[in-house]
Image (tube, rainbow, N blue to C red):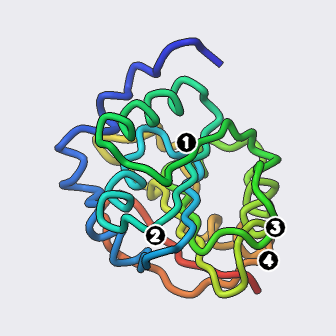
Amino acid sequence: MGHKLPKYVHKLDSPLRKKWQDVDKFIMVLKPFEGMIYVDIGVGTGYFSIPVAERFKGTKIIGLDKSKEMLDYFLSRVKEKGLNKIFAAVCPESSIPISDDYADRINIANVLHELSGPISLLKEAKRILKGGGRLILIDWKAIETEKGPPLHIRIEEEKAKQLLKEASFRIIKLHNIYPYHYVIESSKE
């Protein structure tokens, strides 16, 4: 792991991103509620978490990332915006530092294609998700696009659904809200 932010960090918060990955559409899928506990695995800059925190002040948010530098950047943005009830922790793929049955909602966005062991992370997500909670998985469609990761590392939507099922998730709904990404809503079986 490097000691500085990735070169592409400016793209993660670019206003242009809203055109192809609008947070408002994500929030409609997330169905947040006051007092909920929301875990963002691969929080990055807080692209999804910060708007949730701004709109739902009673929400407790835990941002997890494998990069301490990204978490520091995320927390600096949180502080700059005067938000509270937001916590962050470094998180390896195979072990999430959160208690069982803790989260009402979990978001894993634009991360699946980067994982060396996606099943272990998904099983950990299942462990920390409350009964009745929801996991929202967002990742790049396996199609040629002018932006995003190389096509050869993207995971097809069918494979993502299979991985979720292997980790004992039940697919609830596929949300066709983004041109370059699939969005899969699931719960514990």
Earlier-in-chain disc, 3 versus 2: 3
Quadrant for residue 107, please give it.
Answer: bottom right
Q: CA distance from mark 3 to mark 1?
A: 35 Å
Q: Which residue is mark 2?
A: 183
Earlier-in-chain disc, 3 versus 4: 3
Q: Secondary structure at mark 3?
A: loop
Q: CA distance from mark 2 to mark 4?
A: 18 Å
* Amino acid on which disc 2 is placed: Val
Earlier-in-chain disc, 3 versus 1: 3
Q: Quadrant of the N terminus?
A: top right
Q: Quadrant of the C terminus?
A: bottom right
Q: Which residue is mark 1?
A: 152
Q: Which residue is mark 3?
A: 100
* Amino acid on which disc 4 is placed: Ser
* Amino acid on which disc 3 is placed: Asp
Please state if 40 lies on the left or on the right of 57 as rendered.
Answer: right
Q: Which residue is mark 4?
A: 168
Q: Relative to 42, does residue 10 appear above or below in the rendering?
A: above
Earlier-in-chain disc, 2 versus 4: 4
